[in-house]
Image (spheres, rainbow, N blue to C red):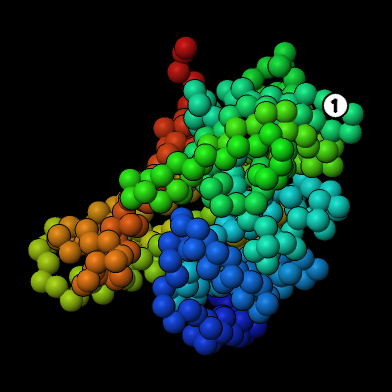
Amino acid sequence: MDLSFSAEDLAFRDEVRAWLAAHLPPEPLPSLETAPGFAAHRAWERVLHEARLSVVSWPVEFGGRDASLVRWLLFEEEYHAAGAPGRVGQNGIFLLAPTMFEHGTPRQRERYLPPMASGAEIWAQAWSEPEAGSDLAGIRSRAHRVPGGWRLSGQKTWSSRAAFADRAFGLFRTDPDAQRHRGLTYFLFPLDAEGVVVRPIPRLDGKPAFAEIFLDEVFVPDEDVLGGVGEGWRVAMSTASSERGLSLRSPGRFLAAARRLVRAWRARDADPEVRDGVVDAWVGAQAYRLATFETVTEVLDGARIGAEASRSKLFWSELDIALHETALELLGPDGELAADSPGAPDGGSWAEGHLFALAGPIYAGTNEIQRNVVAERLLGLPREPR
């Protein structure tokens, strides 16, 4: 693992830091889980894109800077340290785009990546289904061939960003007679197409962070199949590796939260048990940073991220919960105040962050499934008899 940064890397970091200091919104944006907040975050994506900072690791032709993974991690550290707005386009930028670079056609990249980078098109993830949940091989939504393309039918649920997004990506069964992991195809489709109905799912606070998507004979042309007919499982595992591994949860997110937690602890006379939790959170964030740089070093040497992504997902999802639980214990009743409450510590971010952290062991594949992956594929343990 190489933790030394070149002069060019450090110059890039300083450029990002200075740009963020000069361009951050003067006030926090409304929640991106509301219509006004979604629009405000989309506008912020345009500002980032104009500075070629929305997708720094992408090729220049698609709006990026051809930055290395090391510089992307440095960007993420500066972005979160500055308290910059959440990325409303994260499903596209961090999940679909890496999959498209690996499996997409030149036409698909030219068509979809530039508007993804600018925020002109926001993507929803349409994977989970009723009675299937995290078991992607158990999906029932289907697609049948018609002249020029396919007709998609079925129901997707817990689709993040779908309440306000423009397009979605998801798996559909194109060969009902194939084995569970076969006969699946990865499709891209618009959410305003004829036959699509989107029904928002409100959280406890009423904000529609998710939605159900109902599809009734929705036409999708052949050119919007990603990775080939019947290759959906293989392509989806590429997306899952991004979701659980490098892309979705960079260390910068947890480093920034751990720093805020340390500041809150220093401002209070906390008991030793809380102090130990603060130290554990800070150490955990540093450990995740080092592990990520180790992964980046391996990737730059030609390795591919496989089952190791499940190990990373287990670590960051449980770190997130522990960090926020420690913050709430430290802050007491004040930590439960929402963003619109006077006197809420850190703008009410701890309460909302805790609620979101609780979902971490569920999304991106439940942690129970990830432990099975780690046990069988990394540790070589035998499968449990069925």
Quadrant location, the N terminus: bottom right
In percent of width and height, residue 140 lies at: 61, 22
In percent of width and height, residue 247 lies at: 57, 56
Of residues 282 and 351, the one nearer the viewer is 351
Q: Which residue is mark 1?
A: 146
Please tell me in which quadrant of the rendered image residue 196 appears.
Answer: top right
In percent of width and height, residue 359 lies at: 39, 44
Q: Is residue 352 left or right of residue 370?
A: left
Badge 1 marks a residue whose secondary structure is strand
Of residues 342 and 192, the one nearer the viewer is 192
Determine if residue 311 is in view. no
Please tell me in which quadrant of the rendered image residue 54 appears.
Answer: bottom right
Q: What residue occupies the far right of the structure in this picture?
A: 147
Q: Amino acid at mark 1?
A: Val
Of residues 102 and 309, the one nearer the viewer is 102
Q: Residue at x 25, y 54 (%)?
A: 325
Q: Is residue 219 left or right of residue 196?
A: right
In percent of width and height, residue 353 lies at: 34, 57
Q: Residue at x 82, y 58 (%)?
A: 110
Q: Residue at x 78, y 24 (%)?
A: 144
Relative to 345, residue 93 above or below: above
